[in-house]
Amino acid sequence: MAITHVLVFLVNLIALLFSVIINPSGAVFLSIDCGFNGSSTYKHKNSILWSGDDAYINNKHESQALQYMDTEDDWSTSIRIFPTLKKNCYTIPVDKAGQRILVRASFYHWGFYDNKTSPTFELQFDGTYWATVNKPNIASYEAIYIAKQNTTSICLAQVEDDQIPFISALEIRSLHFNMYSHINPNYALLLANRIYDGANQTLRKLMIPPLINAYEVYSIAGPLAQGTKTKDVEGLTALQRGFDVLEKWSGDPCLPSSFAWERVQCNAVLRYCKNIKISRNLGSFGLSGTLPDFSSMDALQTIDLHNNSLDGAIPDFLGSILNLKLLDLSDNRLNGSIPSSLSDNKNLKLVQYKRKLSLGNVLFAGFWISTTLTRTTNTCFRWS
């Protein structure tokens, strides 16, 4: 991510905290203790209410919560680690798109790794690279940005096979709409340094009130990722809701481009889906039940769902995906006739049978259908 230049903000710390907390919109004020397995909430000694993180992660079963000490009043005594997936995300509800938020992510591994080293992994928000986490002991990172949807995703991405991402705490605050309003909404502010209270020590000796008691240094980073096309996100969400096995995917499906969803390939520039491939031949996916409607993904050119346990009739909505090049529903439990939206499409071409295929009101066991390519792009979803 390009860092364009550095801004230095001279702020009064009390005024800053007041304007953050007393936000007219009252949209977001969350303090999340990652890995906390005690009661649902607890109040820290500074009177801030903390909660566990179960409600904010889709792939909880792909992670582990670890406790360092048996205490319920300190986020630094627990962590959540993610040893399985390449990208692991927290989904945080935001009042509305366009809300400016401050996010602080904190990391304290207290010897989960040896005391001299710390794992290296990436920190991301909404498909945008944020930082590389590799500091020993305790570290915190802060970002201020505008959420483009009514949720924001904070992700930990594995960059080396033997390096397990972890996190201790997440804090999310809505900011007053006037704060940093002069910053281009397509850019983020990343905290570089914060120093406070030193002014009091100096000015007190002069017997005059302090003029400044804190300053912050932020770097401007961007431009922010625009995210996968909304229509494709909606279609993928429908698939995830229909099949529990797909719920492990989280965050932006395509971005950052090197951390697209597992077994998914995308074109990060055009940001729409070309191919879907989900089968049990090359992985552990086993889809069972009926297909939900994901026809909003209208740029799809390949749908490969062979070798699953799909049942019911062949969905008619598949014929509305006009750019479809390849459709493979073989080796499932589908029945009934092929919808006319597929069989009457003159651009469709039968490529290969895997079992038996008959047209008309008879049993359908499987088929492949393809069309000619109608868009020039290397965008690709590949699920296998």
Image: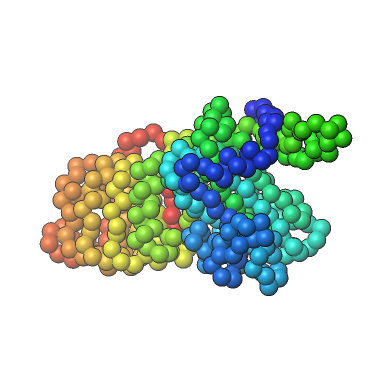
Image point 39% across, 47% down: which residue? 233
Q: In the depicted view, which residue is nearer to us: 99 or 346?
A: 99
> Residue 132, percent across and down?
67, 46
Residue 295 visible: yes
Reply above or below: 238 against 216: below
Report the front residue among 311 and 58: 58
Please tell me which residue is depicted at 63% across the width and 39% down the height of the picture: 16
The C terminus lies in quadrant: bottom left
Tell me: residue 44, above or below residue 94. Answer: below
Q: Is residue 125 left or right of residue 336?
A: right
Q: Which is nearer the eye, 84 or 343? A: 84
Residue 69 position in % (x across, y down): 71, 70
Task: Name the residue at the bottom extreme.
Answer: 70
- Please indicate whether residue 272 sits to the left or right of residue 166 in the image: left
> x, y percentage for residue 97?
43, 40
Q: Quadrant of residue 45?
A: bottom right
Q: Is residue 159 visible?
A: no
Residue 288, position in %: x, y? 34, 67
Which residue is painted at 61% across and 35% down in the image? 189
